[in-house]
Amino acid sequence: MKNQDQNADLLKISSAKERHFQEAHRKLIAAIQAHPFLVQGSVNAVPSSSGKERFTWTRKIRAKTKTISLSEPQAAAFQKAIETNRAVEDALRHIHELSQDVLLDGLPSVLKRRKGGSSGDHEKAS
């Protein structure tokens, strides 16, 4: 933990990147607060022979496609949970990218030896 504290002291982050980072966290929190259930897959409406729509939820589980019949209220709830899950995944993907950029750009990096150079030649890794 002591090393993490030292890194936090060394971290140089621009105010623009900090704003982007805080906004990404706000979007993630807002998505989860709006609807706490997260489900992967898709909901489909399939017309039946009686003319009434039938709903199914499909998702991959251990490399196999699993389809389950749903009632109309279940289909609506699953659809909302799927939309929330996608928003959360998008927000996390953005946070991952921002985190990587901040940590690579904001902390001192190692010096790499230049190819073909003498033993005393070094360049900063990017």
Image (cartoon, rainbow, N blue to C red):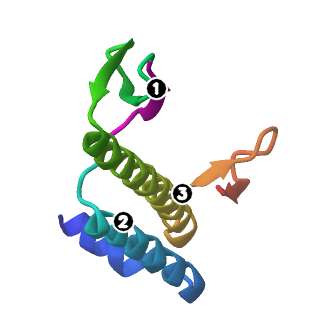
Figure quadrant of residue 122 = bottom right
Mark positioned earlier in the residue sequence (2 or 3): 2
Which class describes the residues within 10 Å of circle 1: few (<14), some (14-19), or many (20+)?
few
Check the image and name the residue furthest to the bottom.
15
Q: In the structure shown, which secondary structural element does the residue marked by tag 2 occupy?
A: helix
Which marked residue is nearer to the observer: mark 1 or mark 2?
1
> Mostly what secondary structure, the magenta segment?
strand
Question: Which residue occupies 75% across, 46% down?
Answer: 114
Q: Nearer the viewer, residue 99 or 30?
A: 30
Asked if the stretch drawn in magenta spans residue 47, the answer is yes
Which class describes the residues within 10 Å of circle 2: few (<14), some (14-19), or many (20+)?
some
* Whether residue 7 is visible: no
Where in the figure is residue 28, as x and y percent of width and height? 38, 66
Question: Which residue occupies 55% across, 56% down?
Answer: 110
Find disc 3 in the rendering and name its residue.
Answer: 97
Question: Which residue occupies 64% across, 55% down?
Answer: 125
The quadrant of the rendering that contains the C terminus is bottom right
Where in the figure is residue 27, as x and y percent of width and height? 42, 71
Which marked residue is nearer to the observer: mark 2 or mark 3?
2
User: Tags 2 and 3 in contact by the CB under 8 Å rule?
Assistant: no
Q: In the structure shown, which secondary structural element does the residue marked by tag 3 occupy?
A: helix
Find disc 1 in the rendering and name its residue.
Answer: 51
User: Tags 1 and 3 in contact by the CB under 8 Å rule?
Assistant: no
- Label 2 to label 3, Cα distance in Å? 19 Å
Q: Nearer the viewer, residue 83 or 112?
A: 83
* Whether residue 121 is visible: yes
Kind of residue indicated by mark 1: Gly
Q: Which residues are magenta?
A: 39-48
Mark positioned earlier in the residue sequence (1 or 3): 1
